[in-house]
Amino acid sequence: MRAVLDGRSFVLTDGREVRLAGIETPEASKAALEKILGNRDVTLKKLGDDKDRHGRLPAFAFITGNQHSAQQILLESGHARVSARVGSVACAKPLLSAEQAARAAKLGLWSEPLTRRATRTIRPMCSASAAASRWSRARSSPCARAEAPST
C-alpha cells in the first residue's frame, strides 16, 4: 500500500486505486484507515473484474495475516457505516454485526444521539440492472474473490 486517499480509498504501490466496498465513511476516517493499513501488505478480494466509474477497484482489503477486512475494522471502531448496497447478504452479515457492535458501544459515528437514531434498510444488490449485476458477480466466495497480496 502506497497512500491512503480518504476514509475508504487507497493507492497500491503499483498505482492502482482501491475503493473499499460495502461501507461509507466520513473524511475524518482517513486517519483510522491509515492506522489500519499503515505500510503493510494488503490482500484484496475484488468484486468482479470491473472498476467503478472513477477507475477505482472496488474490493475488500485484508492486512496479510488478518482475518478481518479493513472494512470490518473500520465498522467495529465506529469509523464507518455499512453502505445501503452491499454485494450480497453473506457479505452484509459480518459488516452489519460490526456496525451494530459499534452502535451499541456508542463508538465513533454512533457517539452522537442523532446518528444513533438514524435507521436505514440494508439491501443486497440484485440483478435488476446491468450495474447491479456487474457488482454482484463474485467468483470464489459469496463476497468476492481473492487477489494476490499487494503492497
Image: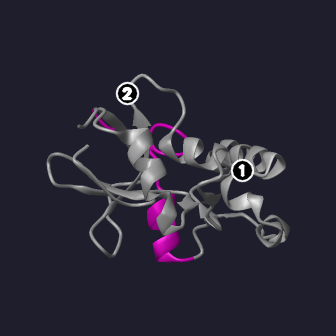
Q: Is residue 6 above or below residue 38?
A: below
Tell me the residue at 22%/47% (across/down).
Answer: 2
- Residue at 41% from the left image edge and 51% from the top image edge: 59
Magenta highlight on residue 136: yes
Q: Which mark is residue 107?
A: 1
- Residue extending farthest to the top is 65
Regarding mark 2 in the picture, which secondary structure is present there?
loop
Quarter occupied by residue 54:
bottom left
Q: Nearer the viewer, mark 2 or mark 1?
A: 1
Q: Position of residue 16 (x, y in %)?
A: 21, 55
The C terminus lies in which quarter of the figure?
A: top left
- In terms of secondary structure, where does tag 1 sit? loop
Q: Position of residue 102 (x, y in %)?
A: 73, 47
Measuring 59% from the left and 54% from the top, which residue is drawn there? Answer: 79
Please state the extent of the stretch shown in magenta in the rendering.
129-148
Q: Position of residue 136 (x, y in %)?
A: 51, 59
From the viewer's perspective, is 55 left or right of 102? left
Reading the image, the residue beneath label 2 is: 64
12 over 62 or under it: above or below: below
Report the side of 33 relative to 5 (left or right): right
Q: How many marks?
A: 2
Colour basis: one colour
Picture residue at 16% right of the left edge, 54% below the top? 15
